Amino acid sequence: MKTGFSTNAFTEKSLLYGLNTISDIGYDGVELVLDTPHAFLPLNKKYLSEIKNCIKKNKIEIANLNANTVVGWYDNNAVIEKFEPSLSNKNDKLRQWRLNYTKKAVELADELESPSICLTSGISTNFEKQTCLRIFTKSLTELASFAETKNISIAIEYEPGLLIENSDDVYHIVSQFNNVGLNLDVCHAAVLGENISKIIKKFRKKIIHTHISDCKNNIHFHLIPGLGSINFSAMYRSLKEINYEGFLTAELYTYSKNPEYAAKITFTYLKNLILNHVY
């Protein structure tokens, strides 16, 4: 398995600074977050060229492109909900905007040689859940076909409070597609009280990418691994059993005031986790 770190910890720094720092620490890969302040799409040619040159100079892989949120859509207006407009939005104009935006993410993944993008379903509306699920599946069907032409995988990330909010919700959907799977965020699983090892064994090859962070007391707050209650040793063993060879990508946006510290401590933790399970 390879180590990765998400740029959303560096929102108070420039993207290029984040890329350089993540590489200097020793990570194998980086997750780019396709939203403000770093990379809301489309990117102008000059900026994209700078990103490409930085990646090439550092010889670092792109672990994943994160298209979960679209804060940039609100421009300078008040942000109502970072996950909206979504692929399940009942307003067809807004849904189409998000669909086109996510296709741009797929195109960028192809250009940057990222194996995948991750996405979310949108906010849950319990009284219209079935309608929104049908809309989401319709969007995903079109998107999956488009991504297949680029050989890009789509990883659905679930989160408490979203339309797709647990692993069972994801499993029901991904079984319908060849190139759609799970972005396993272990903090979200822990918040919901799910058994992470059971999720891994259930999804197996459908696990496309991971988000690694700790949590405690079922509170949705991403902690540096080792500071909470998640059993990462059991998680790692389960991933080894299914022959997962992808990235363990730390997602620690909660440490934007000191991302360098979070990245260094987490890198040491992940490397030790890997070294302690070499057999």
Image (spheres, grey):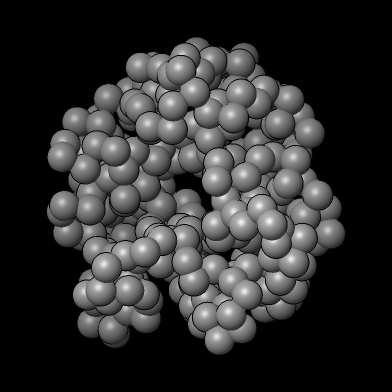
What's the residue at 55%, 57% (across, down)? 123
What's the residue at 24%, 64% (across, down)? 37
Q: Is residue 122 visible?
A: yes
* For residue 225, side relative to residue 117 (left or right): left
Residue extending furthest toward the front: 127
What's the residue at 71%, 48% (across, down)? 170
250, 129: nearer the viewer: 129
Q: Quadrant of residue 238?
A: top right
Residue extending furthest toward the right: 176
Q: Is residue 28 above or below residue 140?
A: above
Image quadrant containing the C terminus: top right
User: Where residue 9 sits in the image (x, y, percent)?
Assistant: 28, 45
User: Where residue 230 sits in the image (x, y, percent)?
Assistant: 50, 18
Q: Is residue 234 above or below residue 80?
A: above
Image quadrant containing the N terminus: top right
* For residue 108, side relative to residue 71 (left or right): right
User: Where residue 44 sits in the image (x, y, percent)?
Assistant: 28, 84
User: Where residue 155 sits in the image (x, y, percent)?
Assistant: 62, 54
91, 176: nearer the viewer: 91
Q: Is residue 133 visible?
A: no
Q: Please count the marks in the image.
A: 0
What's the residue at 49%, 23% (across, down)? 218
29, 193: nearer the viewer: 193
Q: Is residue 139 above or below residue 165?
A: below
272, 145: nearer the viewer: 145
